[in-house]
Image (tube, rainbow, N blue to C red):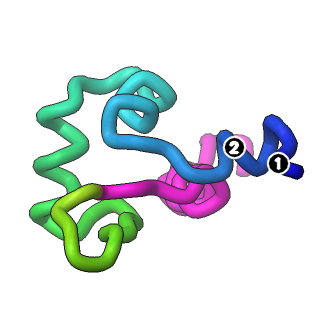
Amino acid sequence: MSTDSDIKRWMTTDDVAEYLGVKRSSIYQYVSEKRIPVHRIPDSQLLRFSRDEIDHWMEMGRVETIAE
């Protein structure tokens, strides 16, 4: 049986855009530039994003503060 966390592990392009607060077209641009981690469903053009990978990707872009 799937849990809510299992269901939300994989996100669509719209899910990621909403999660990050950007436009869907920005997500497609990031994908085409290979700037965001993405998975293609085999034998299709469908994209899926791992929530854990997106969170890690965001953490990698962290900028240090002056105090650090």
Q: Is mark 1 on a helix, strand or loop?
A: loop
Q: Residue 7 in the image: x percent, y percent?
A: 69, 43
Q: Which residue corresponds to mark 2? A: 7
The vertical placement of 1 against 5, above or below, is below
65 relative to 41 in the view: left or right: right
The boundaries of the magenta stretch are 47-68
Q: Give the labeled residue for mark 1.
A: 2
In the drawing, does residue 60 fall left or right of residue 27? right
As for residue 25 lying within the magenta part, the answer is: no
Q: Do the residues labelled 1 and 2 touch (CB within 8 Å)?
A: yes
**Amino acid under disc 1:** Ser
Q: Which residue is drawn at 42% across and 37% down?
A: 16
Q: Which residue corresponds to the image point at 13% horizontal and 34% vertical from the top-left?
A: 25
SS of the residue at dot 2?
helix
Q: On the picture, is 34 further left or further right than 29?
A: right
Q: Quadrant of residue 52?
A: bottom right
The residue depicted at 44 percent of the width and 32 percent of the height is: 15
